[in-house]
Amino acid sequence: MLIDFAALEPKHAYARMVSLIVPRPIAWVSTISADGRTNLAPFSFFNGVTSNPPTLMFVPVNDRHGNKKDTVRNIEAVPEFVVHIVNGALAEKMNACAALLPYGESEFDAFDIASIPSERVRPPRVADAPVAFECTLHSRLDVGEGPLAGNILVGRILCAHVRDDVLDDAGLVDPVKLDPVARLGGESYSRLGELFAIKRPDRR
Ligand SMILES: Cc1cc2nc3c(=O)[nH]c(=O)nc-3n(C[C@H](O)[C@H](O)[C@H](O)COP(=O)(O)O)c2cc1C
């Protein structure tokens, strides 16, 4: 099968991409408005960028009317955010946060998600998340315009909170204890399957 993306409407291109680029980690992102109202939303167009400087990126796309997501509006006002890693226990709450709430209505309150203050940024963090990266906005790149156009947001990682119970005896993250949830196409998700290692070739 050959998929001609140049001939696809954006919504169909999106459906194809999310089923082909898999599995995707999920950034569960908390932000805050200028007047202190919190927001929490999941984004699976998400990954690390580089360690020099420590950075990550996620991509809120415009809605089908071409409007920016609440997360983007908040970051434009307060350029700070917390990116949480979602585990199996939090998957339902994360998914609830994809609901369309009016701007300013907090998903923390609407879905009974416990928050605690962050160390170095204004948005609070999810109390039960296994990992939380506190970030300031490093840079932004807008790709396209109108419905489903992307706003690539690069965050400078200031610090990360890692729950002690996901660490092994050496103090490293144990992926099985972390239990990360990944997104596939449509409404499908995955958890870790078989783990294996492959020795890397020599490198510079
Ligand atoms: C698992 C999952 C992953 C998602 N990934 C994205 C994404 O990468 N980009 C995006 O714009 N929306 C994504 N969404 C949809 C947003 O979470 C949804 O539009 C949400 O309402 C945005 O919240 P906000 O307007 O409060 O920022 C995803 C939803 C789920 C459940």
Image (tube, grey):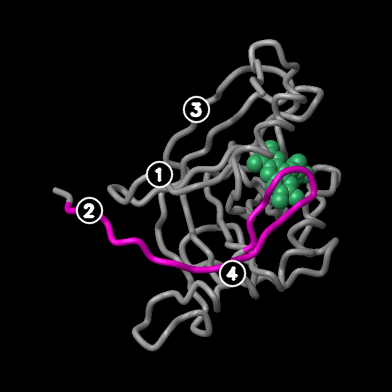
Residue 11 can be seen, yes or no: yes
Q: x, y (%) of residue 126?
A: 64, 68
Closer to the chain start, of discs 3 and 4, is: 4
Which residue is at a point 44% across and 35% down the rendered structure image? 139
Could you say which is closer to the camera, residue 181 or residue 152?
181
Which residue matches tag 1? 49
Which residue matches tag 4? 117
Please identify, in this view, whether the residue under mark 2 or under mark 4 is nearer the observer.
2
Please identify, in this view, whether the residue under mark 4 or under mark 1 is nearer the observer.
1
As measured in the structure, the alpha-carbon distance from the residue carrying label 3 to the one carrying label 4 is 29 Å
As measured in the structure, the alpha-carbon distance from the residue carrying label 1 to the one carrying label 2 is 23 Å
Side (left or right) of 24 relative to 139:
right
Q: What's the amino acid at mark 2?
A: Pro
Which residue matches tag 3? 141
As measured in the structure, the alpha-carbon distance from the residue carrying label 4 to the one carrying label 1 is 26 Å
Seen in the picture, residue 3 relative to 191 is either above or below; the reply is above
